[in-house]
Image: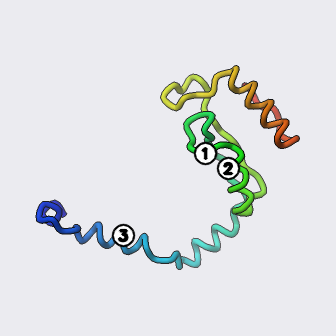
C-alpha cells in the first residue's frame, strides 16, 4: 500500500474500501435488524461533545422511526468532552421542558 501511494497510485486496498462504501446497502440481515430498532440510548448533543442541537437530533430520531431517545451529555467531570455545567444543565432542562412538555428530571 505504501509503495502504491508513493508511486502516486491509489492503493488497491483503499480503492476496494471506497468501492464498497459507494455501493447501495444490500445486506438483508442488517436491514432487518435496523427495522427492529425502536430508539437510541446513547446520544450527545452540542451541549456537551456532540455535533448537533437537540432539536435536530429529535427530528432525526423521529424521521428514523424511533419511539424514544436518551440524551447522555457528559458531566463537568469529563473536561475533555466539554461537560455540561450545573448552570447550563438547569437552563437546558428548562428549555427541554418548555420545548417538549415532557421528560423526567435527571440529576443536573
Task: For the residues labelled 1 and 3, say whether their Cβ atoms are less than 8 Å apart.
Answer: no
Quick one: SS at disc 1? loop
Question: Residue at horizontal 85%, vertical 36%?
Answer: 98
Is 50 rendered above or below residue 107? below
Name the residue that disc number 2 marks.
57
Q: Nearer the viewer, residue 97 or 106?
A: 97
Disc 1/disc 3 C-alpha distance (Å) = 27 Å
Name the residue that disc number 1 marks.
52
Quick one: SS at disc 3? helix
Residue 89 position in % (x across, y down): 71, 27
- Quarter of image, res 30: bottom right
Task: For the residues labelled 2 and 1, say whether their Cβ atoms are less than 8 Å apart.
Answer: yes
Q: How is the image coloured?
A: rainbow
Name the residue that disc number 3 marks.
18
Total labels: the figure holds 3
Mark 3 or mark 2: which comes first in sequence? 3
Q: Which mark is residue 70?
A: none
Question: Residue at horizontal 19%, vertical 64%?
Answer: 1
Q: Residues within 10 Å of mark 1 (few under 14, many from 20)?
A: some
Amino acid at each position: 500500500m505504501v509503495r502504491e501511494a508513493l508511486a502516486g497510485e491509489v492503493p488497491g486496498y483503499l480503492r476496494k474500501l471506497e468501492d464498497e462504501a459507494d455501493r447501495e446497502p444490500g445486506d438483508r440481515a442488517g436491514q432487518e435488524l435496523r427495522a427492529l430498532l425502536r430508539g437510541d440510548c446513547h446520544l450527545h448533543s452540542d451541549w456537551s461533545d456532540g455535533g448537533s442541537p437537540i432539536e435536530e437530533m429529535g427530528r432525526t430520531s423521529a424521521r428514523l422511526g424511533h419511539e424514544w431517545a436518551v440524551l447522555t451529555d457528559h458531566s463537568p467531570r469529563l473536561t475533555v468532552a466539554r461537560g455540561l455545567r450545573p448552570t447550563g444543565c438547569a437552563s437546558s432542562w428548562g428549555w427541554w421542558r418548555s420545548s417538549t412538555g415532557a421528560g423526567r428530571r435527571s440529576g443536573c
